[in-house]
Amino acid sequence: MKYTVTIEITMPREEVAQLLADPAHLPKWLRGLVLHEPVSGAHGQVGTTSRVVMQMGQQKFEGTETITRREPADLRGIPKGSVVHFEREIVGEGMWSAVRDRLRPLARGSR
């Protein structure tokens, strides 16, 4: 299954990127998150693997998340017009998920 979701956020892109990169905010966008702990690497950096535990009702899922892309690496001073990429894969028993977040400025006149 493949699907795309678009969300318009009325905040500066740099601020949104920094919120997404902050582990304290993970439960806000990973519904059902019980635990997210780095196993190797630094949180949010390419190549980092983390143990992820999620629970929805009676169902519990445990897997490994790997950060596969983060551009730019430094989220301060993001060049105007550039696209910010956050990509990760989560693998667990019977499940594989690839998430590709892109933060881009709205086109002028799109509101």
Image (cartoon, grey):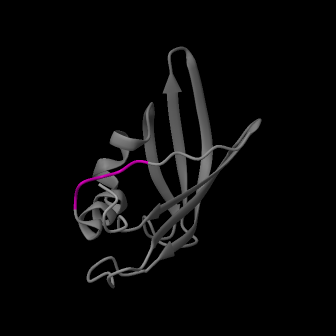
Vertically, is 63 above or below 70? above
Residue drawn at the location 47% of the way across and 72% of the way down: 45
Front residue of 37/3: it is: 3
Question: For residue 3, what is the image quadrant?
Answer: top right
Q: Which residues are magenta?
A: 7-11
Residue 75 in the image: state x and y as whole percent. 33, 76
Residue drawn at the location 56% of the way across and 71% of the way down: 69
Q: Quadrant of the N terminus?
A: top right
Count up the numbered dots: 0
Vertically, is 34 above or below 58? below
Horizontally, is 59 left or right of 110 in the view?
right
Residue 18 in the image: state x and y as whole percent. 29, 65
Horizontally, is 6 left or right of 89 in the view?
left
Front residue of 34/72: it is: 72
What predominant SS class does the magenta segment belong to? loop
Quick one: which residue is furthest to the right in this view? 94
Quick one: which residue is furthest to the front in this view? 109
Vertically, is 105 above or below 57? below
Residue 102 in the image: state x and y as whole percent. 48, 63
Residue 76 in the image: state x and y as whole percent. 27, 80
Q: Quadrant of the C terminus?
A: bottom left
Residue drawn at the location 59% of the way across and 47% of the way down: 4
Question: For residue 16, what is the image quadrant?
Answer: bottom left
- Magenta stretch holds residue 50: no
Question: For residue 61, what is the image quadrant?
Answer: top right
Horizontally, is 28 left or right of 10 in the view?
right
